[in-house]
Amino acid sequence: MSKSINQIQDEIIEEFAMFDDWMEKYEYIIDLGKELPLITDDKKTEDRLIHGCQSRVWVASEMLDKHLVFTADSDAIITKGIISLLIRVLSNQTPEDIVKSELYFIGKIGLQEHLSPTRANGLVGMINRLKSDGLKQLTS
Amino acid sequence: MSAFNVNEIRADFPILNESVHGKPLIYFDNGATSQKPNAVIERISRYYTHENANVHRGVHFLSDQATNAYEQARTTIARYINAEHSQEIIFTKGTTDSINTVAFSLGETLKPGDEILISGMEHHSNIVPWQMLCERKGTVLKVIPVTPAGTLDLEAFEGLLSERTKLLSIIHISNTLGTINPVEQLIQKAHALGAKVLLDAAQSIQHLPIDVQSLGCDFLTFSGHKVFGPTGIGILYGKKAVLDELPPYQGGGDMIDQVSFEKTTYNGLPLKFEAGTPNISGAIALGAAFDYLSSIDLQGAFQHEHALGTYLRARMREIPSIRFIGEAPETCSTLSFLIGDLHPFDLGTLLDKQGIAVRTGHHCTQPLMKQFNIPGTVRASLAFYNTTEEIDQFIVALQRSILLLS
């Protein structure tokens, strides 16, 4: 059986606990960005672009066997790393679980600053998009 | 007054002792807002502790005191920019509010087909109010192109300027490129054809001495918070003869002479343009910011800052695949750059983690970003309280960031 959203969040929190320096943490985020399941270029359409980001972020989702699978891309590496974390937590989960998930790992690994409205990198926008894609599956 | 000493000056700005992510703060985002000296911070506190009352109203002691301090600030600012009369200084919310005031009030005097001339390097706040005016009044917006080096195309400027031009509204120093525009020349040419000139000094008042009489501009706008004063207060300077001819912008208290349901008459300058209870503490503290500037070796401060800008550019040239956005011969200590294909957001985030505050993004100049075909830039913008040591640390942090991202 695949891992639950909270199991994955706890795993990520544990991984990040190894770092005591900000730069190490970001080095890891940058590495994660390279593992992001990339959206294909033909899906980089205006409706898949998340607004409110300083960097451009595209997200696509697809239902596979009752689970929602996400792919994404961004022109900024750190943004790719952050969305890669989100996708690791939320991809391959059921729409119900995605919609009701509480993403506590963001605060625990010290990325809550990216949730602030001044950051404008659109982490809030990314989360909203992933969840609204889940909601669309539930209501369609 | 003692000769400029950066360490003594830094002691006047308490925030410079802050740490960010465990590192000493290096504040290179002065183009967005400047830090405040103790003199300004204490002035706000003193006003609310000892003097708070509404202005131009009460017969009581505190109201008198507040009114005097508010009007004294106006006089201080008039003197600093060498305005002929203190009534030429209008307190506004900031540069944006100042430009909107002119766009509305001067706009009321314009006819369809009249032209407003701006440039391709304007901040959105010197673009959008004119677009709104053009929609409202049928006036026409013309744009002076910017060269690849980030200077104004002066030949094109002369071609665009005509007797239809009613206003040239132009940025003095570009917030994105750091370019210092040849405003004396522009003002002279615009005046020769009968156009009025608005100079957006939001990015120049803190870097250069400003003398409105020798510049000859009809309007000058700036924000308090970029010149070591508080947020929410700004200045619209206008020549008395020009402002006298304009209708008021907003209606309300303070701007009236007599109100009746049949006919209301308006107050004279400057109150005609100051409807409602103003930002009293902000105005007084902005006066304190200019008093502070007058109390230091300002010429020495400007020289120090200019040297910092030169040093920053020289050190930045050491970085492989550096690209300066804006390479005008005349620049201030503001530098926009890109490195290879690294995204400004990535660089800005990693610099922040090393205690360095820079701005990333389009800097409210999207048309300029479009022209250079870039998503944004990283911008380091200095003030006279910055040091060469900070620049050295910035370069080290930048190199570390590049290494991580490559």
Image (cartoon, coloured by chain):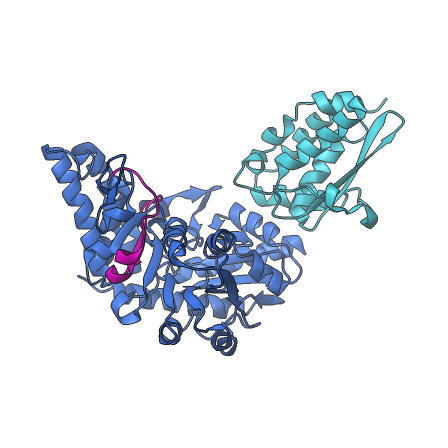
- Relative placement, left or right, of B197 versus A65 is left
Please give the range of residues in magenta. B228-253
Percent x, y of residue B384: 34, 60
Q: Quadrant of the C terminus of chain B?
A: bottom right
Residue lying farthest front? B262
Asked which quadrant contains residue A10, the reply is top right
- Relative placement, left or right, of B139 versus A27 is left
Asked which quadrant contains residue B180, the reply is bottom left
**Colour representing chain B:** blue
Question: Depth check: B73 or B36 in front?
Answer: B73
- Relative placement, left or right, of B1 versus B330 is left
Percent x, y of residue A24: 61, 44
- Identify which residue is drawn at 12% across, 38% down: B64
**Residue B231 part of the magenta segment:** yes
Question: Depth check: A134 or B95 in front?
Answer: B95
- Identify which residue is drawn at 70% across, 39% down: A83
| Chain that is coloured cyan in the picture | A
Asked which quadrant contains residue B262, the reply is top left
Q: Quadrant of the N terminus of chain B?
A: bottom left
- Identify which residue is drawn at 37% across, 51% down: B101
**Residue B142 part of the magenta segment:** no
Residue lying farthest right? A65
Percent x, y of residue B189: 39, 76
Is residue B172 depicted above or below B133 in this figure?
A: below
Percent x, y of residue B348: 55, 51
